Image: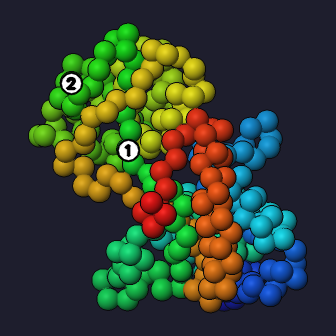
Amino acid sequence: MRRLILLCGLLLCLGTAQAQVRDFDRINESGTLRVALYQNFPPYSYEQDGQPRGVDYELAQALAKGLGLRLELIWAPPGEKLDDDLRDYIWRGRVTAQGELADLMLRVPYDREFSYKRNELGELINELVVMFGPYQRERWQLAHDRRRLAEVPSIAALRRHPVGVEVESVPSFYLSSVQGGMLGKQTHHYPTPQLAFAAMRAGEVDAVMALRGEVDWLLHEAGDPQLALAENAYPDLGRQIWEIGMAVHESNRQLAYAVEEQLENLILDGSLERLYARYGLRYEKPEQYQ
């Protein structure tokens, strides 16, 4: 037993030793920028025919190129919470992982309240992370099939129409509970927004609710004029618009400044908006650029 404990301790130490933060000088010397992107998260970051694709992937490429570096991808399976993802890819690393920490992580909420969130002991949960560089605004979106649901002026219109959502997502909790649970029986759950959308096309549900970017992309890919975007509001949903940014280790602010300079150029010259358009997405600038 003693040998087993010592061996486990040694393996943990080795795993921790591998996860080292690279400062800006070391990043430049290596010639690569390691960027963590969420895995299987279209249209933001995913693989198609074995090749990486998505708006976050192409943005990461542009940022690396602007810094004179080659992009090195780290595919990040999402954890249960964002705190877990920041821990695994920015400041501690995964104990079971063989690779290095990412220098930069994309698609992190740019939110002061989250940045300064504390645990039950009053300690900052993400004190080793700097969240910066907002590059888009995100919101929730409903799409519907006009052959079965002509319009959606409000969520009350869904009382007689089944709606597809991703399991354990905000739309799932919202539609199941809003206004006393009036839509609970009409809320159908699927493993992914793509499967919920496929169910709408197959006639199993009449509408789908997901992130605006996901819905925009799915409509773009489908190319069906009978599938439309709803313009309804979402009463009692809470925060309905938020900004998406990036994260680095708190010791790597020099990298953050350099990345933010490149990002600003991409936003102001319209490159980022054109990138989103190639995937059929509407682009909404962060507040500081409007």
Instruction: Identify which residue is drawn at 17% across, 29% down.
Output: 156
User: Callout 2 environment at 10 Å: few (<14), some (14 to 19), or many (20+)?
Assistant: some
Specify which label sits upstream in the sequence, 1 or 2. Answer: 1
Residue type at numbered disc 2:
Ala
Give the distance between the C-alpha atoms of the residues marked 1 and 2, in whole angstroms. Answer: 17 Å
- Which of these two is toward me, 232 or 168? 232
- Residue 56 visible in the displayed image: no
- Which of these two is toward me, 166 or 285? 285
Q: Which mark is residue 140?
A: 1
Q: Quadrant of residue 231?
A: top left
Residue type at numbered disc 1:
Trp
- Residue 157 visible in the displayed image: yes
Percent coordinates x, y for residue 241 in the rendering: 36, 54
- Which of these two is toward me, 266 or 38? 266
- Which of these two is toward me, 148 or 88? 148
Q: Quadrant of residue 74?
A: bottom right
Instruction: Identify which residue is drawn at 75% across, 85% down.
Output: 24
Residue lying at the far top in this picture: please name it.
Answer: 147
Q: Which mark is residue 157?
A: 2
Image side of residue 87 versus residue 211, left or right: right
Percent coordinates x, y for residue 283 in the rendering: 52, 47
Percent coordinates x, y for residue 70 in the rendering: 84, 65
Tell how many labels. Answer: 2
Quarter of the image that includes the C terminus: bottom left
Instruction: Identify which residue is drawn at 57% across, 28% down.
Output: 220
Quarter of the image that includes the N terminus: bottom right
User: Callout 1 environment at 10 Å: few (<14), some (14 to 19), or many (20+)?
Assistant: many
Instruction: Identify which residue is drawn at 62% across, 73% down.
Output: 260
